Image (spheres, rainbow, N blue to C red):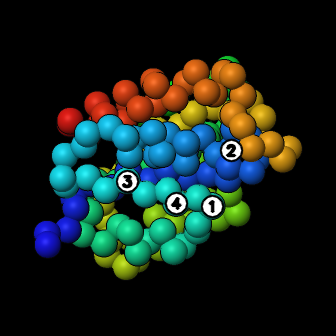
Amino acid sequence: MEPKKILILGLGNILLGDEGVGVRVAEQLLSHPLPDEIEVIDGGTAGYELINFFEGKEKVIIVDAVKTNDTPGSVYKLDLALVQEDETVQLSLHQIGLKNVFKMASLMDLNPEVTLVGIVPKDYQDYNIGLSEEVEKAIPLAIETVLKEIEQ
């Protein structure tokens, strides 16, 4: 069987409210008809073990909460190559930042094109299984952003 060329990786902790939005987007994408070359994975709060999923991939689309001062529910599409240079951008709210994961992947000669679809969280510090209304409403736009990225 030929390996899938595009990986959609939903990240987040569903126990911390909006911090789990990437996982929720991945869950919904699994119900969409997607081309055979696309793999969708719930990466949860995994760290360096995510590198195993990059092997053989040409493109990785990460969906995750991105902390900014913008309005909760705002959706961003970010090129990882550009934001890796900016130390003020917090790409992940998890224990190990995505920047470190991709630095390690690069050392292992795994260099897929990476795009981050980020959703600004409202509530991500208190134990809460559900998403805020603002972030829940942003899921369709995040899915649309991912699907457009696949087409490119």
- Amino acid type of the residue tagged 2 in the rendering: Glu
Contact (Cβ within 8 Å) of mark 2 with mark 4:
no
Q: Which residue is mark 1?
A: 45
Q: Earlier in the sequence, mark 2 or mark 3?
A: 2
Residue 132 place in picture, x, y as percent: 72, 28
Instruction: Give the CA distance from mark 1 to mark 2.
Output: 10 Å
Q: CA distance from mark 2 to mark 4?
A: 13 Å
Closer-to-camera residue (112/128): 128
Q: Is residue 13 above or below residue 140?
A: below
Observer-side mark, 3 or 1, equals 3
Label 3 residue SS:
strand
Q: Secondary structure at mark 1?
A: loop
Q: Say which of 66 and 17 sits in front.
A: 17
Q: Which residue is mark 2?
A: 19
Q: Residue furthest right?
A: 126
| Residue bearing the label numbered 4 | 43
Give the residue type at disc 3.
Val
Graded by Cα atoms within 10 Å as few (under 14), some (14 to 19) or many (20 or more), the crowding at tag 4 reads many
Q: Are marks 4 and 1 in contact (CB under 8 Å)?
A: yes
Q: Is residue 134 left or right of residue 109?
A: right
Relative to 66, 150 lies left or right: left
**Residue 96 at least partly seen:** yes
| Residue indicated by mark 3 | 40
Q: Quadrant of the N terminus?
A: bottom left
Q: Seen from this angle, which residue lies furthest left?
A: 2
